[in-house]
Amino acid sequence: MEKRELTCIGCPMGCQITVELDGKEVKSVQGNSCAIGDKYARNEVVNPERTVTSTVVVLKGDKTRVSVKTKNNIPKSKIFDCMKEIDAVRIEAPVKIGDVIIENVCNTGVDVVATRNIELCEATK
């Protein structure tokens, strides 16, 4: 039986969690103070996922970059491929919060969306 020690990131408590595994099967979760910790620990040892945040270059905007994030978590193993896709994107202003910047990033079924508004630069109007 394998044991893994984790620090939970599900809430601000940061519980120290111990997960016992038998192969890929979770046998027990201990140390969490809430159900969020149990869910986090089980997912983290079997299928870790993350939300990716970054920025994308904006052309003709009042700012040169727009902050973006994955709309949902993606597999942790796809983070570097996701970042390569994000880094290659160039978009034109205007950009609105929630605009889809990349559909189905890395074939995960998850979109990358803008998290801020960027207006058209006055000089280009």
Image (spheres, rainbow, N blue to C red):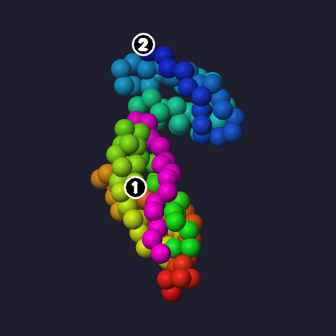
What residue is shown at x 53% (from left), y 60% (from top)? 67
What residue is shown at x 59% (from left), y 32% (from top)? 8
Magenta residues span 47-60
According to the picture, the residue beneath numbered tag 1 turns out to be 86
Q: Position of residue 65 (x, y in %)?
A: 51, 63
Residue type for callout 1: Ile
Instruction: Find the residue positioned furthest to the right.
Output: 13
Neighbor class of circle 1 (other Cα within 10 Å; few <14, some 14-19, many 20+) is many
Tell me the quarter of the picture where residue 18 sits.
Answer: top right
- Please state the total of marks drawn on the protein image: 2
Above or below — where is 122 with respect to 20? below
State the mark number for residue 1.
Answer: 2
Determine if the magenta segment contains residue 121. no
Above or below — where is 46 with respect to 116? above
Q: Position of residue 89 (x, y in %)?
A: 38, 61
Tell me the quarter of the picture where residue 79 sits.
Answer: top left
Tell me the quarter of the picture where residue 78 sits.
Answer: top left
Horizontal placement of 57 versus 5: left or right?
left
